[in-house]
Image (cartoon, rainbow, N blue to C red):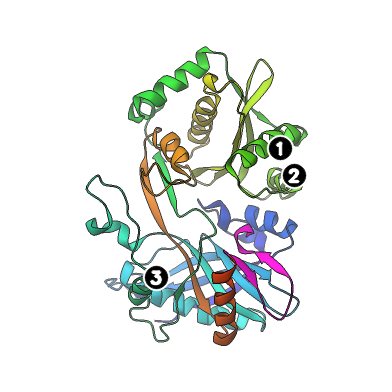
Amino acid sequence: MQCTIEPKDIREIERCNIPQQTAFWAGVKYQQGLNPLAFNYSAPGDLLDPMAKNRYHKEGDLLLLLQPIDSDHSIAYVPYGPVDEPKFENQGLFLEELSEILRPKLPGNCILVRYDLPWENQWAAEDDHYDEHGNWTGPPDSEYQELRVNFKTSNKNLHKSQSDNLPVNTIFLNLRNDPEQLIMKMKPKTRYNIRLSLRKGINVKSYGPEYLDEWYMLYKETAARNGVTLHDRDYFKTVLESTKKNPDNETDVRLLMADHHGQYLAAMFLVLSSKRGTYLYGASSGHKRNMMATYALQWEAIRISQESGCTEYDMFGIAPNADPSHPMYGLYRFKSGFGGHMFHRMGCWDYPLSEDEYMVIRAQEMNSAGYLQHPRKATLCNARAI
């Protein structure tokens, strides 16, 4: 088994269902001050599937973001990548080989490669990790996860990160169904609320950058209500305009806003990437909640995704189960009403390139709730921002 890897131009990244592994995302993060790098890798078939009998090589693209920790150190972050998903027993082996061939392509001051894996959580296939009501109870403790993931590896060097950056739990809708079938697969209350919002005159349209102020007012209100960290306005301007700056980019971003007689009540960023629509960011007003604007908004995003040729829709972020005490339970109740199936990802995994430096970073992250800090410097970098 032997992987090979070569740098490639960001603009030449192949189309992909995952927005975070596209030239679009590279452009967004470049505007945030990160350094995106693109690679093409080739992996033998039996590295991905140990039962593969035919001799073949699988080629794939990898988008990586270099994040400085301070003037002397950086980490390499792979958002929702690699896209290719090996069989469970070979996942660690694949990541180890990929990391080692990446090593000489990265700066000498790079402390680790952090993979934010989009792959299905290995334990999601096991009945023992669901309660009597079918609720996902999560994977085992990190040490047991690491034992399994490092199976077959030479260095036993893969570590579960202290926290995850991108959502690990989501709901996927199958857009191969026609609109009437989609409606019928929803919970009755969701169907009712969609129809109610339309009867009450909720209007949903796509808007350009000139409406970012209206979006940002709703976004700030939502962030304050839920106690979440704010992106600044320019970030969303970059998200909305990045595809226009690169005419070769096949990812499409829509700012959808729902209004009632000119009063904006809900808004979202919809990303159309290859065959997937993704609900990337959302916001809503506390006013006129009886109008159910968020339901009309979500239904329009699903409809646009389907009309654009997408075969799936990613709700992008949900509580892991129906636990009312979970801080994201409200999102769970809302998003699960649209039907679809729950999907649990593997989350962030680290491959240290400098063991001593990595242990320092790991200790700092444990003490600072997900923030990266090198003790020799005062600079803080929010890992979740990438």
Q: Quadrant of the N terminus?
A: bottom left
Q: Which residue is mark 3?
A: 142
Q: Which residue is mark 2?
A: 233
Q: Quadrant of residue 361?
A: bottom right
- The first of marks 2 and 3 along the sequence is 3
Task: Say which mark, if any, is on residue 216.
Answer: 1
Residue type at the position of mark 3: Ser
- The first of marks 1 and 2 along the sequence is 1
Residue type at the position of mark 1: Tyr
Q: Is residue 313 above or below residue 155?
A: above
Q: Are marks 2 and 3 in contact (CB under 8 Å)?
A: no
Camera-side residue of 276 and 123: 123
Q: Going by the image, does 289 lie left or right of 91? A: right
Q: Position of residue 381 (x, y in %)?
A: 68, 66
Can residue 63 be seen in the rendering of this structure?
no
Label total for image: 3
Q: CA distance from mark 3 to mark 1?
A: 38 Å
- Label 1: element kind: helix
Q: Going by the image, does 204 lie left or right of 41? A: right
Q: Within 10 angstroms of label 2, few (less than 14), some, or many (20 or more) residues?
A: some
Q: Quadrant of residue 373?
A: bottom right
In the image, what residue occupies the spot 43% across and 81% down?
Answer: 2
Whether residue 376 appears in magenta in the rendering, the answer is yes
Q: Are marks 1 and 2 in contact (CB under 8 Å)?
A: yes
Q: Position of residue 172 (x, y in %)?
A: 41, 43
Over which residues does the magenta segment extend? 369-386
In the image, what residue occupies the spot 46% across and 22% down?
Answer: 194
